[in-house]
Image: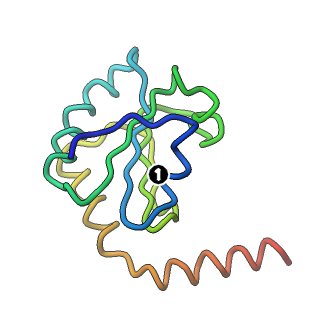
Amino acid sequence: MSTRNLSYADFESTVSGEGIVLVDFWASWCGPCRMFAPVYEAASETHTDIVFGKVDTEAEQQLAAAARITSIPTLMAFRDGILVFSQPGALPAAALEQVIQAVRDLDMEDVRRQVEAQSAKADA
């Protein structure tokens, strides 16, 4: 599966579903973004069970602001609707593979417990 462009209108519905969704926040004028793009595209062809989304921060400024993007490229990983990874900077292919494997290996029951505990603490 190749990458797909995400907009403000479809971002939430894309990342909130079941499974793994990776999102690359980028801009055409960004050199590191252009270097990361073929690495990201190649991974999307290898990992066909993962949704690979791209957000053009110039075209989707409202979405980039809502996601609190301060540096590009920024890679976010969602699993089962939960943000489990967010890091700025272009990753080499091996590092992207490590991120993908780490997201696959997550114990999502444990992640949900941690999210609930943080939410309860914030509400207290």
Q: Quadrant of the C terminus?
A: bottom right
Image x and y of residue 18, in percent: 42, 67
In depth, the one of 71 and 57 nearer the eye is 57
* Color encoding of the figure: rainbow
- Crowd rating for badge 1 (residues with CA inside 10 Å; few <14, some 14–19, many 20+): some
User: Residue drawn 37% across and 75% down?
Assistant: 106
Image x and y of residue 110, in percent: 49, 84
User: Residue drawn 13% across and 52% down?
Assistant: 46
Image x and y of residue 98, in percent: 24, 60
Image quadrant where residue 28 sits: top left
* Amino acid at the residue labelled 1: Thr
* Residue 83 relative to residue 19: left or right: right
User: Residue drawn 48% across and 54% down?
Assistant: 15
Residue 84 drawn above or below residue 75 = below
Image quadrant where residue 104 sits: bottom left
In depth, the one of 5 and 95 nearer the eye is 5
Q: Name the residue tied to disc 1.
A: 14
SS at badge 1: helix
